[in-house]
Amino acid sequence: MSSPVDARRPTAPDPDRIGEKPDAAGRFGAYGGRYAPEALMAALTELEAAYRRARADATFGAELATLLRDRVGRPTRLHRVPGFERVLGVPGVRVYLKREDMAHTGAYKINNALGQGLLAKRMGKTRVIAETGAGQHGVAVASVRAMLGLSCVVYMGEHDMRRQSLTVAHMRALGAEVRGVRAGGGKVKGAVSEAVRDWVSATDTSHFLFGTVTGPAPYPAMVRDFQAVIGVEARRQLLAAEGRLPDRVVACVGGGSNALGLFHAFLGDPEVALIGVEAAGRGIETGQHAATCTAGAPGELDGSFSYLLQDADGQVSRTHSIAAGLDYPAVGPEHGYLKDRGRAVYHAVTDATALRGFQALSHAEGIVPALESAHAVGYLMECAQRGELPPRALVLLGLSGRGDKDLGIASVSLHEA
């Protein structure tokens, strides 16, 4: 059994625990790469070189680790939930939540935002550009802006701004400029495109602080590395609490950085099942969903080759999810690689199931999860109901963020149901 994590010690991602590395072209097997306009190639090459130097520099790692401890509140708690275990009704089942909702700004997004913010300063950039869907990445970037003395512009789809008005107010309160985007259905896809356009015109002074594990290399591996702290901590904490590894590790998947951050520390343990939970929206059969690994096919979007949702003509499909953070038509290339290898499996649950998970965890434990995380909670409930969760199973579930931002959506939806 490993010793408990010492909360007094800074904790940062351990590069030696990262289970998969892309090749020299930034590919995980067939997926990944760098599909970007010529105007961005120099900036991407600069970023890759700067990140490589930073990873090799102990002072960068030490500064990031100290900030994660002192400003973010790491390590976040590993929390057993006996009330929710009773809801599941499976004899002897034990469920632990990795509580990223307890990190500063209320979600896991701050881990990557802080890492890239420090990297931007090392590169001499004075401004960061970001995209956001649910708003939690934008809030994290805006908070890092204040911590590090940078200026900040956040692009957000107008549809998402309406349904996540609280996070818009939060970003502005933190000093960020928030720009609405109509393109792409007013969702995160359009926000990404506008952020890239901004970056093309200002690469000398600005860094695109991308929030997930998609995009051109080096973003998929770099963002995953900055989120690696989640899995490194959880592995140590669960070994200390239970003396063994989990049977299942479960996390929601949109672009996929939350899930990879949790999965990566267990990739070398074949006895641990890795389960990604996507958004089935109103049902896969309706076409109104965001279940990329479940229903998508390989293709290129936003600078990377991976699974994405597309129509018969190869055009990117419109998506739907009650959770804005899952409402994206592509997934990170490492997820495509893990899917094809069979190392991770992906399931999709509907808006209705996510709402049941939201309500069940709130009522049983007094923990209000983000609607994104509620998909993983609802999936676990469905497994129990179908008899697919064995007795005495040990489950690690990633709680990616808190649900304050979603209370309005959830309360209306639950009332209508």
Image (tube, helix red, strand yellow):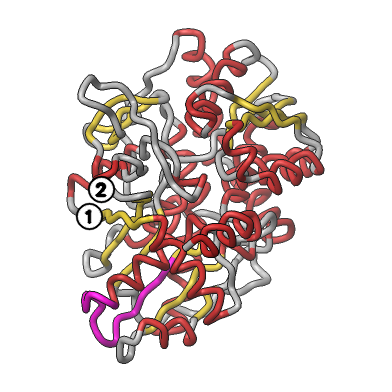
The region drawn magenta spans: 385-397
Left or right side of 93 for 29:
left
Asked if marks 2 and 1 touch (Cβ < 8 Å), the reply is: yes
Vertical arrangement, residue 305 with respect to residue 355, above or below? above
Q: Position of residue 212 (x, y in %)?
A: 48, 40
Which amino acid lies under the numbered mark 1 shown in the image of this protein?
Arg
Is-magenta flag for residue 388?
yes
Amino acid identity at mark 2:
Leu
Q: Secondary structure at mark 1?
A: loop
| Farthest residue, direction top | 38
Residue 201 is a magenta residue: no
Q: Quadrant of residue 94?
A: bottom left
Residue drawn 73% across the image and 60% down it? 70
Seen at 65% across and 60% down, the residue is 404
Q: Which residue is denoted by mark 2 in the rendering? A: 338
Q: Is residue 40 above or below residue 159?
A: above
Is the residue marked by circle 2 packed among few (<14), some (14-19), or many (20+) residues within 10 Å? some
